[in-house]
Amino acid sequence: MSLRYLGSRIAQQIDEELMGSVGAFSLDQLMELAGLACAQALASVYGQEKYPRVLVCCGPGNQGGDGLVAARHLGMFGYKPTIYMPKPGSKDIYKRLKTQCDNMDIETIPPSSDLEPFRAALKSSDVILDAIFGFSFQGPLTSLRDGTSIKERSRKLASSLTFS
Ligand SMILES: NC(=O)C1=CN([C@@H]2O[C@H](COP(=O)(O)OP(=O)(O)OC[C@H]3O[C@@H](n4cnc5c(N)ncnc54)[C@H](OP(=O)(O)O)[C@@H]3O)[C@@H](O)[C@H]2O)[C@@H](O)CC1
């Protein structure tokens, strides 16, 4: 299997085109599709029976929203997702997606200066889905609210990949 990646500029242009008058998609639609695609990609590589525990790391922007959608779908696929959210997003869409995960009783590690729960989750997870930053990430990494610099290493790392 070969992998193809999109750079941030092209990804942003595609989203702008899709959300413009020609594409006519809404943000909710695109986010739902992005999160579903991530969950499906993960499931195609890390089967639920062998890798049931997925740690979904969600950043504060729309990429974090993609992660919340993915967590919901992974839960529906039979995985046991846990959400790590060092800095919750403030947008309405983000809050609604989080409520949907809460309604499915998906466990969340809340923002905290105590990193032990996050470290414990890293150790007990089979796969990590990285939804911390997307195309709006720029400049040097500044810490998130609890000081986490996301340099923790994992055994398996799944990200927003395009499979072909
Ligand atoms: N049409 C769309 O928009 C769609 C987008 N989609 C998805 O969303 C992604 C883009 O989402 P996005 O634009 O919300 O930004 P994203 O990359 O998640 O991060 C923003 C946050 O990062 C922070 N931050 C930035 N740099 C930082 C640094 N150096 N160090 C620390 N923090 C830093 C920044 O903080 P701030 O600058 O506001 O303080 C802000 O809070 C895109 O890749 C795709 O996956 C899909 O859902 C489909 C539709």
Image (cartoon, rainbow, N blue to C red):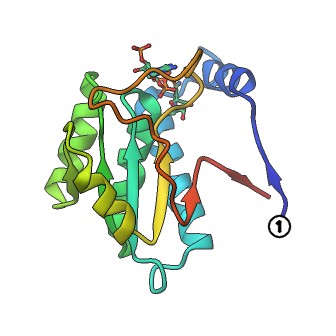
- Estimate the x, y position of residue 84 in percent, counting from the top left: 31, 48
**Could you tell me which quadrant the C terminus lies in?**
bottom right
Determine which quarter of the picture holds residue 27.
top left
In the image, is 53 to the left or to the right of 87? Answer: right
Name the quadrant containing residue 147. top left
Q: State the image quarter where residue 138 is shown.
A: top right
Q: Quadrant of the N terminus?
A: bottom right
Residue 136 coordinates in the image, percent (x, y): 55, 20
Q: Is the residue 158 above or below the residue 85 in the image? A: below
Q: Secondary structure at mark 1?
A: loop
Asked whether 27 or 6 is in front, the reply is 6
Q: Position of residue 33 (x, y in %)?
A: 51, 45
Q: How many marks?
A: 1
Residue that mark 1 sits on: 1
Q: Residue at x 46, y 49 (%)?
A: 152
Say left or right for 99 vs 91.
left
The three-letter code of the residue at mark 1 reads Met
In the image, taking residue 22 as reference, residue 52 lies left or right, namely left
Residue sitting at 30 percent across and 29 percent down? 93
